[in-house]
Amino acid sequence: MSTSPENRDRAFLAWLKDRYPITQFAEWAEHKTVPVGRNAFWYYFGGITLFLFLIQVGTGIMLMFYYKGSADTAFESVRFISAKVPFGWLVRSVHAWSANLMILSVFIHMFSVFFMRAYRKPRELTWLSGIVLLALLLGFGFSGYLLPWNELAFFATKVGTDIIGVIPVIGEPIMYVLRGGEEVTGSTLPRFFALHVALFPALLTIFIAAHLFFIQLQGIHEPEVWQEQPEKRKTMPFFPHFFAREMLLWLITLNILAVLAVFFPAELGVKADPFSPAPAGIKPEWYFLATFEFLKYMPAHVGPIEGEQFGLLLISIGFLVWVLVPWIDRGRHPTITKIVMAAGVLILVFLSIMTYLGWAA
Amino acid sequence: MKFERRTIVNWFVGGSAAAWLGSVIHPIVRFLMPPPEQEAAVSSVKAATLTELQPNSGKIFKFGAKPALLVRRPDGTFSAFMAKCTHLDCIVQYRADKERIWCACHNGFYDLNGTNVAGPPPRPLDALEVHMQGDDVYVTRKS
């Protein structure tokens, strides 16, 4: 009998088929389809987010080989990574850029789902698990930002954790636990490190699995117009058509990432000093700029409560409404749908303007 | 009132489950809450010398484990405050060009008495007392 590679592959396949339901899997893969149409482009952003997350896991593990998470050593170890470790600057820059692109792509994904009204029945839980994933990604960004222990990160963490402390009743204990004491100190760093490399990745993996499982069970949302005009329905097979396109986009994303990381490497700045004043022009990462800018416009007091509490109350109410959108717009009343869609446009415009103002300030 | 056997069993099992959960969660929560640090009570700190600070300038100094701000006003007198902004915890600084105390994080201003006068800070800065001993500037907690 010939031992050509082809025969060996077949033998291995036969060995697998003998033990696992490979045929069923192949049949399932063959029948999986994706809608084709005007909005099809937006379907790729969930996958791009997943790709960027995989890059984060890879580069994150690599950075952990050199990173030393204490107030005395963190800044120096990141400087060592950037300056001495071969390609250390590249790995760190890819990690930083990939984080930013991931949050950008998850925002694009979320708003595209919103404007396609894909959150509606039966996909409420997909929407909710997506919101949890967004919150986790923002948590990743916030906790990772502190790890180089530089001046900007130090003050961003002070402000960010203080905002949490403003929440009535539970805010102060949470702030205390996050900071590892009353203030942001060297005790805060190992806590953020533990969140960043252990708790958040574990939770994110669970919620990504749930998110994908829901999508797998229900299939990708199809345009509403197809329900009334089934003759317009057009799909493409997931394997290999959609899959190949997604892989091509992953490759393009990787190229964009490489260009950004090489030409705009992540900066390190000045080491944090708990006894120096906040530097002029201090700003958080771009995805927190809108909140930052919005809180700036709050007066010292609004009625009986402090301005920042009032601002946070408004943001919380807005967020809660956003979370509950599948139950607000169920597609039964066209007027409600119109209002919800208009509100979505307003939110997008508001976030863009606030982010721009924060960036330009 | 008559209890069904099932109700009693449900209460017993539910109670046990709650007690078990409590005995697991309690130590976790207590573990995450750091024990309060024993901070030496600071009563008096030498913040600067007279020649160190020109009129219309400021300096951050350590008041125990916390940052504080010593300001030499344009008229040459001193005042001191805890340097923690009452808005969102950033560390404030003296702005000679405005003759005010400034927080860079959200553009908050305090006057030279520590009163919040512009921007988002909701309260005045915590004031400290300044005493002169020869050429040395000492700062103490407000009595």
Image: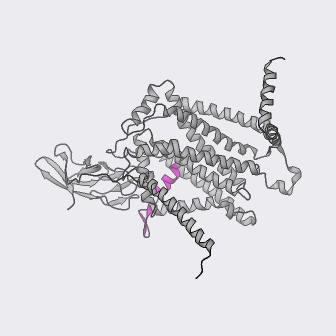
**Closer-to-camera residue (B22/A263):** B22
Furthest toward the left, the residue is B134
Q: Residue A133 vs residue B89: left or right? A: right
Magenta stretch contains residue B17: no
Let me know if residue A265 appears in the view. Answer: no
In the rendered image of this protein, does residue A8 appear above or below residue A305?
Answer: above
**Closer-to-camera residue (A282/B12):** B12
Which residue occupies 14% across, 52% down? Answer: B132
> Picture coordinates of residue A136 (x, y %)?
56, 49
Task: Please state the extent of the stretch shown in magenta in the rendering.
Answer: A288-307
> Picture coordinates of residue A142 (x, y %)?
49, 46
Q: Place residue A345 in its image quadrant.
A: bottom right
Q: Residue A133 vs residue A162: left or right? A: right
Q: Residue A74 vs residue A260: left or right? A: left
Which residue occupies 69% across, 50% down? Answer: A112
In the rendered image of this protein, does residue B8 appear above or below residue A92?
Answer: below
